[in-house]
Image (spheres, helix red, strand yellow):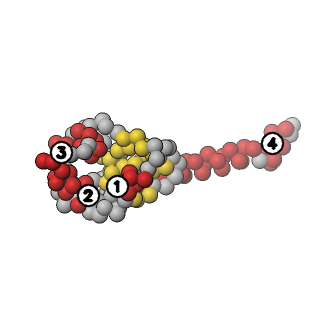
C-alpha cells in the first residue's frame, strides 16, 4: 500500500492511497495514538469537520483542485474510477509511505508502555520501597 499524507482532520492525519483499486478503500485515517483505519477517501472528505488540506506539491494541488472542463475526465479517472495512473512527474517531491498501517500500532505500543511505566512508578510498592532504610 502506497499512501500520501493529504490533510489533517482535527488531530488525525488523512492519507490518500495511491495504489487502491476501490473507492471504498482509498484513504487511511490515522488518529493520534490510535490504530489506522482504511476509509472511503471522498466520503471521509465530504463529511470531515475542520479538514485542513495540504497543498505542498503539484500532486496535492491537483488532488484538491476543481479541474476545468478539459481536465475533469482525467481527474475523475485518476481519483474516482481509479483506472488511470498518476504520472510519475506529478509525484516529484511527494513523500510516499508504504508503512502507514503499522504507524498506529507502533504509537499505541509506545503509549501503552509509557502508561504502564507511569503506573509502576506510582504504585504503593515502589513508594514504600523508596522510604525504607538499608
Disc assigned to residue 42: 1
Distance between the alpha carbons at the discs numbered 1 and 4: 53 Å
- At a point 45% along the width and 55% down the height, the residue shown is 36
Residue where numbered disc 3 is placed: 68
Residue where numbered disc 4 is placed: 127
The quadrant where residue 24 appears: bottom left
For marks 4 and 2, give the one nearer the viewer. Answer: 2
Disc assigned to residue 80: 2
For label 1, the crowd category at 10 Å Cα-Cα, with few meaning under 14, some 14 to 19 and many 20 or more, is: some
Q: Earlier in the sequence, mark 2 or mark 1?
A: 1
Q: Nearer the viewer, residue 68 or 120?
A: 68
Distance between the alpha carbons at the discs numbered 4 and 2: 59 Å
Distance between the alpha carbons at the discs numbered 2 and 1: 8 Å
Q: Earlier in the sequence, mark 1 or mark 4?
A: 1
Distance between the alpha carbons at the discs numbered 2 and 3: 16 Å
- At a point 84% along the width and 43% down the height, the residue shown is 128
Q: Nearer the viewer, residue 14 or 133?
A: 14
Where residue 81 sits: x, y (%)?
Answer: 23, 61
Distance between the alpha carbons at the discs numbered 4 and 3: 68 Å
Amino acid at each position: 500500500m502506497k499512501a500520501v499524507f493529504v490533510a489533517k482532520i482535527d488531530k488525525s492525519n488523512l492519507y490518500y492511497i495511491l495504489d487502491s483499486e476501490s473507492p471504498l478503500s482509498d484513504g487511511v485515517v490515522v488518529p493520534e495514538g490510535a490504530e489506522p483505519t482504511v476509509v472511503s477517501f471522498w466520503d471521509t472528505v465530504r463529511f470531515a469537520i475542520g479538514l485542513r488540506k495540504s497543498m505542498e506539491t503539484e500532486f496535492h494541488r491537483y488532488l484538491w483542485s476543481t479541474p476545468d472542463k478539459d481536465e475533469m475526465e482525467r481527474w475523475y479517472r485518476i481519483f474516482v474510477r481509479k483506472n488511470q495512473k498518476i504520472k510519475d512527474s506529478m509525484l516529484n517531491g511527494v513523500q510516499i509511505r508504504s508503512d502507514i498501517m503499522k504507524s498506529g500500532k507502533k504509537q499505541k505500543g509506545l503509549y501503552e508502555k509509557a502508561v504502564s511505566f507511569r503506573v509502576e512508578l506510582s504504585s504503593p510498592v515502589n513508594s514504600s520501597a523508596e522510604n525504607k532504610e538499608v
